[in-house]
Structure formats: C-alpha cells, structure tokens
C-alpha cells in the first residue's frame, strides 16, 4: 500500500483509508495476513479490515462467490487486536436472499452482538 498511499498523498488526498480484504491464495480461498495492519499503519493512515469480503470463496458457488460467514467474527476481532483502526462488514436481514455476497454477509439479527464484541477488543487493545 505504500506506493498507493504515496500516489494519493502526492495528488493532494486529504484522507486515505487503507483496506485489507484478503488475498487470493489459491484453492478458492482468501487469506488475511494480520501483519498487514501494523505494516499499513506505518504509512501514516488509518487501516480498515473488510471482514465479510475476507471470508468469500471466489468462484466456489458454481459461477459466483461462496462464503464462510461463520469466520467473520474471528477475523474481525483478530484484525482489531492486530491494530486495524476499523471494520467494514456487510449485513442483511436474510443473507440467503441477498442480491450479492449473501454467503459472506452477517445476518442482521447477529450484527449488534458482533459489533459489541469487536468494540470490546478494540477498547482493550487501545486501553
């Protein structure tokens, strides 16, 4: 991200948010390297973890992305513990009916508790 940040700041960007969404590792899987958050932080701008994109399984659902939403909470909390400044997470009242990315979305009725648990981690790390 250093070169991206350099280009953006060189062009006069007043606000830059760096994001890790997982990297294609093969086997129709995305992997998040938690070292990314302190590394990106060294660029001097906030870091965000896209916790729902990171659990996608590209092409695993026969022409569309599958997903493992059950891992969103652990990845979100791990990213905050590793130094991420914030999270991006998709939610839906019924992810099975979502137009896009349903398999990786957090059901709306579980979202408030997930946010509370993430805030506990965020506060304890920055305490």
Image (cartoon, grey):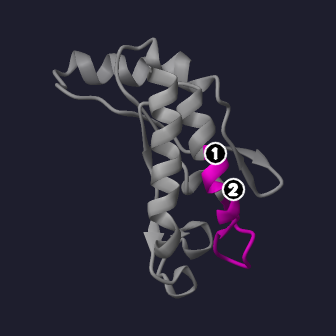
The residue sitting at 57% across, 45% down in the picture is: 76
Could you say whether the residue bearing mark 2 is in a helix, strand or loop? helix
The residue sitting at 53% across, 36% down in the picture is: 121
Q: In this view, does 118 lie above or below 1?
A: below
The residue sitting at 48% across, 75% down in the picture is: 109
Specify the quadrant of the image occupied by residue 16: top left
Q: What stretch is highlighted in magenta?
A: 56-75
Q: Residues within 10 Å of mark 2 (few under 14, many from 20)?
A: some
Compared across the picture, whether 127 is left or right of 36 comes to: left
Whether 72 is among the magenta residues is: yes
Residue 26 visible? The answer is: yes
Specify the quadrant of the image occupied by residue 43: top left
Could you say whether the residue bearing mark 1 is in a helix, strand or loop? helix
The residue lying toward the viewer, choosing from 90 and 4, is: 90
Whether 60 is among the magenta residues is: yes
Q: Do the residues labelled 2 and 1 touch (CB within 8 Å)?
A: yes
Q: Report the Cα–Cα distance between label 2 and label 1.
A: 6 Å
Q: For the C terminus, which image quadrant?
A: top left
Q: Which residue lies furthest to the bottom in this view?
A: 97
Q: Name the residue under label 1.
A: 75
Residue 84 visible? The answer is: no
The residue lying toward the viewer, choosing from 83 and 126, is: 126
Badge number at residue 31:
none
Residue 32, image x, y percentages:
66, 38
Q: Is residue 38 above or below residue 58?
A: above
The residue lying toward the viewer, choosing from 65 and 118, is: 118
Q: Mark 2 points at which residue?
A: 71
């Amino acid at each position: 991200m250093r070169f991206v940040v350099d280009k953006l700041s060189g062009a006069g960007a007043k606000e830059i948010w760096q994001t890790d969404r997982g990297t294609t590792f093969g086997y129709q899987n995305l992997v998040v390297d938690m070292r990314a958050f302190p590394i990106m932080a060294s660029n001097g701008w906030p870091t965000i973890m896209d916790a729902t994109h990171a659990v996608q399984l590209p092409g695993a659902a026969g022409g569309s992305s599958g997903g493992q939403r059950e891992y969103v909470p652990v990845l979100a909390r791990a990213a905050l513990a590793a130094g991420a400044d914030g999270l991006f997470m998709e939610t839906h009242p019924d992810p099975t009916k979502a137009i896009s990315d349903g398999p990786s979305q957090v059901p709306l009725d579980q979202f408030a508790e997930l946010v509370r648990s993430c805030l506990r981690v965020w506060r304890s790390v920055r305490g």
